[in-house]
Amino acid sequence: MNSRKKLIAGNWKMNKTSADGVALVNDIVAAVGKQADVDVVVCPPFTAVESVGRALEGSEVKLGAQNMHFEASGAFTGEVSAPMLRAIFATHVILGHSERRTLFGETDELVNKKVLAALKNQLKPIFCVGETLGERESGATLKVVQTQVERGLEGVNKDQAASIVVAYEPVWAIGTGKVATTEQAQEVHAYIRGLLTKLFGDAIAQKVRILYGGSMKPANAPELLAQKDIDGGLIGGASLEARSFVELVNAAVAAK
Ligand code: PEP
């Protein structure tokens, strides 16, 4: 038992039109929109962030984006900035997701610039780290995660650190149906908390939520969420339907 409030975040990726997104959150809000025991965040694609935000008004469910540029404005065709997201009342932003790293070439250095820009603009980063299957099989998991955490959070100060959410997402478990065992997940979560302790001190490290991501479903969530250092989930596939997402929120309420 710890004092960290659990957090369930939905990463819709490139799914849902604006209208479909509003319909989905209407169902989520009807089911869990008033509970405050667990933090709930939905991260629609950019075209739906504003409309979904309006549909969330008056509920406890928070709004996030899936990416952003580190500059505030300028000649960056196709990008959006932290102030733009703040202006439509987003509170969170997913940064360094493995799909951004592998498909769009995002490096630790780029992710770090985005983390710093998000924090400067009072957006809470959901900062993703995790190893590939090859890295796990060669025994490099902890080293890979260490490098991602240290480089990604470089320059973050102690005042900012508590508002960061870290998501441990083993790349081999994302969208594959393969889930890390509770022991594998807890080991890395505890290791990340140790890294955060070295960077920011124990008091802050104890406040930072570390989410698990990678094929989390209602069936496997209770066991994962019962682990000491697993403070919630970053949910891809199961966040696209109200029923499974709401079940995950309820699993987190039960595990709190
Ligand atoms: C994700 O992409 O962040 C994720 C965890 O996806 P899934 O739940 O579908 O594995």
Image (cartoon, rainbow, N blue to C red):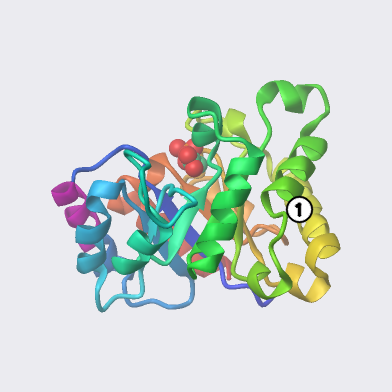
Secondary structure, mark 1, is helix
Q: Counting other residues with Cα less than 10 Å from the Cα at mark 1, is it few (<14), some (14-19), or many (20 or more)?
A: many
Location of residue 147 in the rendering, given as x and y in whole percent from the top left corner: 77, 41
Foreground residue among 83 and 10: 83
Foreground residue among 78 and 185: 78
Give the mark count.
Answer: 1
Q: Is residue 247 visible?
A: yes
Location of residue 238 in the rendering, given as x and y in whole percent from the top left corner: 39, 44
Residue that numbered label 1 is attached to: 192
Is residue 12 toward the left or the right of residue 26 in the image? right
Specify the quadrant of the image occupied by residue 6.
bottom right
Q: Quadrant for the C terminus, please.
A: bottom right
Specify the quadrant of the image occupied by residue 240.
top left
Q: Please name the residue shown 71% across and 68% down the image.
A: 157
Q: Is residue 206 visible?
A: no
| Magenta stretch bounds | 18-26
Q: Please name the residue shown 19% across and 56% down the image.
A: 22
Q: Please name the residue shown 37% across and 40% down the image.
A: 13
State yes or no: residue 159 in magenta: no
Q: Please name the residue shown 60% across and 28% down the image.
A: 172
Farthest residue toward the front?
75
- Identify the main secondary structure in magenta: helix
Position of residue 201 relative to residue 92, above or below, is: below
State yes or no: residue 22 in magenta: yes
Location of residue 1 in the rendering, given as x and y in whole percent from the top left corner: 71, 72
Foreground residue among 239 and 199: 199
